[in-house]
Amino acid sequence: MSTLLEARGLTRIIEGEVSTTLIEDISFSIASGEFVSVTGPSGGGKSSLLYLLGLIDRPTRGTVLIEGLDTGTLESDALAHLRLTTLGFVFQFHFLLEEFTALDNVMLPMRKLGVLSNQAMIERASELLAQFDLAPHIHKRPGQLSGGQRQRVAIARALANQPKLILADEPTGNLDTRNADSVFAAFRDIVNNFNASVMVVTHDPDLAARADRHLKIIDGHLA
């Protein structure tokens, strides 16, 4: 498998009267079509790592390469475009817009990218929702959906622009066991059927064990 993402010596320090090192000298890679889980104690640096890999934060030292491209050389606009076209994000809280239907929420990243016609966006969003067993619910608003359904809508939204990597931060943290299992099954489906890689931060060791590879972050270091 080819290397999709490579982290080289990633370090993130928050400067202040007392500097805080969030993560330090972390290096690893993610292959195309790989499902990676990340666990570790709260406050150990898992989310900080994810935000660096997702190009939301910039590292103090080190860099992230995506398909060999050194993202540390990119300006803000180029980083934003790379995030929109190559990366998809799923968080613990679904962050769906309550005034929009499931269909409209999934179309949002496509509207921002501005490549597809309105009809093509509707068709793609509908297909994505159907693949996650949400076809009967496409015109419902988030408040009319269960927690598991809302999170699957968020996963469909993350896939809207056909990203190569999905980054998920505690996506099952607010779900019961049955819905958490459903969400993890959706991530496995992404790897198997959407030609994408997935990296999931989770506190659940049983779910983490279902990934192809398991990383552990302790006190800002890769254990």
Image (spheres, helix red, strand yellow):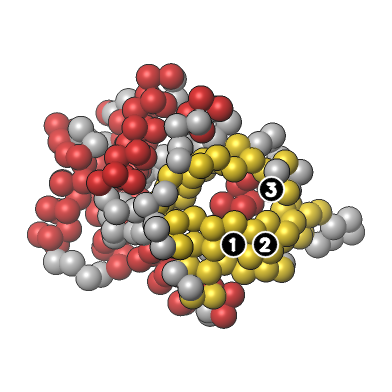
- The residue to which callout 1 is attached is 7
* Residue at which label 2 appears: 10
Amino acid at the residue labelled 3:
Leu
Q: Crowdedness of circle 2 by 10 Å Cα count: few (<14), some, many (20+)?
A: many
Mark 3 lies on a secondary structure that is strand
In the depicted view, which residue is nearer to us: 105 or 73? Answer: 73
Q: Position of residue 6 (x, y in %)?
A: 54, 63
Residue in the image at 64% along x and 51% along y: 48
Q: Are marks 2 and 1 in contact (CB under 8 Å)?
A: yes
Q: Amino acid at mark 2?
A: Leu
Quadrant showing the C terminus: top right
Residue that label 3 marks: 222
Marked residue nearer the N-terminal end (3 or 1): 1
Spot occupied by residue 151 in the image (x, y as percentages of width and height): 37, 36
Residue 28 can be seen, yes or no: yes
Q: Is residue 8 above or below residue 201?
A: below
Residue 12, x across and y down, in percent = 71, 60
